[in-house]
Amino acid sequence: MITTLSNKYMHRFLIVFSLFLILFCFTDFVFAENNNVIIEFYFADGCDHCEEKIPIIDEIEEHYKENVSIIRYSIEIYENRQRFFQYSFNTTPGVVVKNETSGKFSIFPYELITFENIINAIDYYLAGNDSIKPPVPTKNTTFCFLGFCFDVSKLSLPVLTIAMAFLDSFNPCAFFILIFLLNLLIYVRSRRRMLLIGGIFIFFSAFIYFLLMSAILNVIIFVEQQFIIRIIAGGFALVFGFLNIKDFFLFKKGITLSISDEKKSDLFKRMRKIVKTPFLPAMIIGTIVLAIFANTYELLCSLGLPLVYTAELTTHNLDNIQYYMYLIFYNLIYILPLLIILLIFVIKLGGRKLTEWQGRLLKLISGFMMFTLGLVLWISPDLLKNVFATAGIILISIISSYLISVFWKKYKSNNPKTQE
C-alpha cells in the first residue's frame, strides 16, 4: 500500500513538473519574442551633428548585433520625414529605441544621444520591463540672468526671426521709397494725411512681403527636398550678399540689386500724382498701387533674407498655422523701422533724405548677413538652430560691416583720386 501511495504521488509530481517545464519554456519563448528591440536613427545629408553621433550608433550596432536591429532613416525622403515629425523631433539627428512587439519606445533628440542613454534604454526593453516607459535623462538648457530663467533650446527660431527681420527691415530700397514719398507729403502740411498715406504704404508693403514669403514657403514644402532647398537658398544668399557688398564699394556699377533710375523715375511720377490728388479715396487707391509697384521693383533688392529665413523655417517641426504665424511675426518686425520713420516725419513735419553713404552702409550690413548665412546653409545648417550661434553670426556681420565702412571711408579721404 505504501508503494502504491508513493507511485501515486510520484505520478502527480511528474505531471506537475512537466506542466511547470512546459510553462517555463513557453514563457521563455514569449519573453524572447516580446523583446525584439529596434533602433531608428534619423539623419539628414550634410548634417554635422549627425556625423558626430554616427560612431555611437555604429558601436551599439556592433555591441548588440544579436539582439538589436538598427534602421537608418534619411529625412530627405518624404515618408521618413513624416515618421521623424511624428516623434516631435525638431532637428536631426534623432534616435528612437523601440520594443517592436509592444510598441513602446523612448525618444532621444540630439542632445540626449549618448552611448550610456541608449544602452540603458536597450537593456530596459530587452529585460522585458516595459510596463512603463523608462525615465529619459534630460539635458539642462535653462539659462538664468538677473533672476529671469528661460530655456535656451526653445529660443533659436524666435531669435532668428527677430534678428533676420530686423536686419531685413533696414532695406535701402524700402527706406528710399518711403522717405521720398513722405518728403513730398510734407508740402501737404497735414499730419493726418501723412499718417494715413504712410501707414497704408507700409501696411501693403508688409502684406505683399508676406504673400511673397508665403509663396516661397509653399514652394519649399511642395519640393520636400530639404538638402536641395538649402543648396538653392544658400546659393541665392551668397550671390545676393556678394552683390550687396559689391554695391558698397562700387555703387551702381556693373550688376546691381538697386532700383534702376528708369524704375525710380516711374515711381516718382506715381508719387507726385498721389500728392497732387485732392480726392482722398483716389489718394488711398494710388498709394496701394504705388506700394504694389514699389515692392515689385525692389523684389531683387530684398529677396535674399526672406528666402534664407523661409528655407530655415521649414526645417522646424511646425503646423501650417505656426509657419504662417512666424511669417506674420517676421513682417511685424520688418515694418517697425518704417513705422518709426513715419512717426518722426509726422511729428516733426520735417524732411530728411537717405544719403548715398547711408544706403551703401545698409547694403554692406545686409550683404554681409546674407553672405554669412549662405555659407552657414552650405557648410553647417544646424548652426541656425543654436541661439548663441545665430546671435554670433548677426554680431559678426554688423561689427565687420562697421569696421570695413570706417576703414573704407578713411581710405577714401586719404586717397581723393580714387573717389567714384
Image (tube, rainbow, N blue to C red):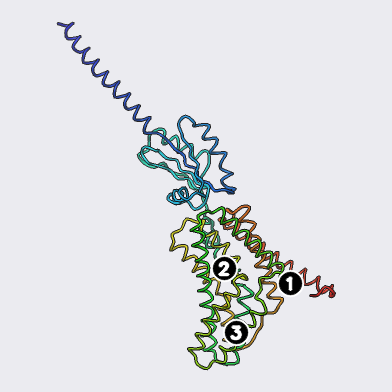
Q: Residue 253 carries which label?
A: 1
> What kind of element bears circle 1?
loop
The amino acid pointed to by label 1 is Lys
What is the x, y in percent for residue 266? Answer: 62, 82
Q: Is residue 290 left or right of residue 259?
A: left
Which quarter of the image is occupied by the N terminus? Answer: top left
Work out how far the residue at label 2 is from the one at label 1, CA to CA, in angstroms.
28 Å
Task: Look at 69% across and 68% down and name the residue there.
Answer: 364
Of badges 3 and 2, the one in the foreground is 3
User: In the displayed structure, would residue 401 be above or below residue 39?
Assistant: below
User: In the displayed structure, would residue 156 be above or below residue 286?
Assistant: above
> What kind of element bears circle 3?
helix
Residue furthest to the left: 1
**Which callout, 3 or 2, points at the residue further toward the start of the chain?**
2
Q: Is residue 79 left or right of residue 21?
A: right
What is the x, y in percent for residue 406? Answer: 75, 70
Which residue is under mark 2? 165
Work out how far the residue at label 3 is from the one at label 2, CA to CA, in angstroms.
23 Å
- Categorize mark 1 by other alpha carbons within 10 Å: few (<14), some (14-19), many (20+): few
**Which callout, 3 or 1, points at the residue further toward the start of the chain?**
3
Q: Residue 68 carries which label?
A: none
Of badges 3 and 1, the one in the foreground is 1
Which quarter of the image is occupied by the C terminus? Answer: bottom right
Visible residue check, residue 111: no
User: Contact, CB < 8 Å: mark 2 with mark 1?
Assistant: no
> What kind of element bears circle 2?
helix
Work out how far the residue at label 3 is from the one at label 1, CA to CA, in angstroms.
26 Å
> Observer-nearest residue: 91 or 224?
224
User: Contact, CB < 8 Å: mark 3 with mark 1?
Assistant: no
Q: In which quarter of the image is residue 27?
A: top left
Q: Residue 181 carries which label?
A: 3
